Amino acid sequence: MKERLSTTVQQLKPSGIRRFFDLAASMDNVISLGVGEPDFVTSWAVREASILSLERGYTSYTANAGLLELRFEIMKYMKRNFNVSYDYKDDIIVTVGGSQALDITMRALINPEDEIIVVEPNFVSYSPLISLAGGVPVAIETTEETEFKLQPRQIEEVITSNTKALLLCSPNNPTGSSLSKEELQAIADIVIKHDLLVITDEIYAELTYDEEFTSIASLEGMKERTIIISGFSKGFAMTGWRLGYICAPTEIAKAMLKIHQYTMMCAPTMAQYGAIEALQNGQHDVEEMRKSYRRRRNFMVKSLNQIGLECHSPGGAFYVFPSIKKTGLSSEEFAEQLLLEERVAVVPGNVFGKGGEGHIRCSYASSMESLEESIKRISRFVENKL
């Protein structure tokens, strides 16, 4: 029988996050700090807007690129919040979550052997999506010594004649590190010097705590070479709605739209109506969630450091990334034993790339009661290992 599966797909590894999530789901009395999902329910106003769209019978396809009204609201939101201007008719595509946005971005940009620079530790789908598009992910490893922030010199060290783009995520998943305007400017200078593109995953833009978020697209000379990936899952607590969007230069957006037309047609109609309400009237809810996450971040960072797991204070997202090296366990060993012995689910840092070994990712998008109990269990576990 002929080989049925593509070689590329056969070489892909299953998601390390999913493995621990499935294991935790099969056990009782587990506190999960594993999955990156808000513990807030989508605001009632957003849900009501979606329900109303159904009552009105808005159940057919929308335009391929999304409802014109929603793209108009995204345009206003990007200008108001991040000082970046886009043409809502030609530069914005509404997608089925940020994941689909990333997928069609890679497929629209990459020719065989094109190299895309990725910053590790990073979200688990980046490198596989690059490989599936025929490209080559080139990893830059960041470390705890720099609070997992990309150093500009590291970019120049890996640039070759095949380098096409740099993929950024700030605030970062899994480390929570957030790049300042000055740090982004230093990166932008190199990107412009070498005529690269930047793909910037800004899904956590609303969840920054210590300083104002800056989009690299807002810096001089960068908008025309930047593709912004974002969505409603994290900031607006709409993970299950699967709604994201892309903002890109017109030529690139038109190429992406071809792939979107053939593979997805359009994002779910009722979700798009809910998103319009979120952008028009949801900023207060976002701010309340941000305040709550900040309090939880401060609690987790202080508590983990007190029990001896060194942990920098992340500038955004809802993850902490403490070191577990003093226990002598690998990331996989620590996560698995913690789950089996104390019923706390975390994600081993090595699933996010080599730079993540010796660390675990803990999501603090859980109630304070759950976080306090998880710290008690982690503390007991660490004491027994030392």
Image (cartoon, helix red, strand yellow):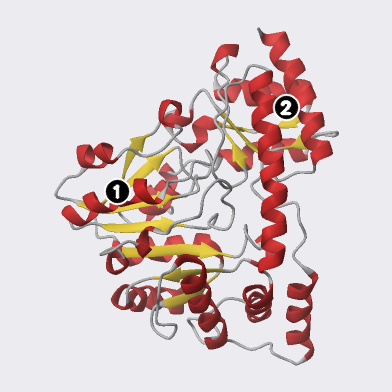
How would you rate the neighbour count of disc 2 (Cα within 10 Å): few for under 14, some for 14-19, many for 20 or more? many
Query: Could you tell me the amino acid type at mark 2?
Result: Leu
Residue named by callout 2 = 339
Task: Please indicate whether residue 256 sits to the left or right of residue 40 in the image.
Answer: left
Task: Please indicate whether residue 40 sits to the left or right of residue 222 in the image.
Answer: right
Q: Position of residue 141 (x, y in %)?
A: 36, 33
Separation (CA) of disc 1 from disc 2: 39 Å
Front one among 132 and 32: 32
Farthest residue to the top: give it: 386
Farthest residue to the bottom: give it: 56
Residue named by callout 1 = 187
Helix, strand or loop at disc 2?
helix
Front one among 3 and 321: 321
Query: Could you tell me the amino acid type at mark 1?
Result: Ile
Helix, strand or loop at disc 1?
helix
Q: Is residue 131 visible?
A: no
How would you rate the neighbour count of disc 1 (Cα within 10 Å): few for under 14, some for 14-19, many for 20 or more? many
Residue at 70% over, 46% down: 365
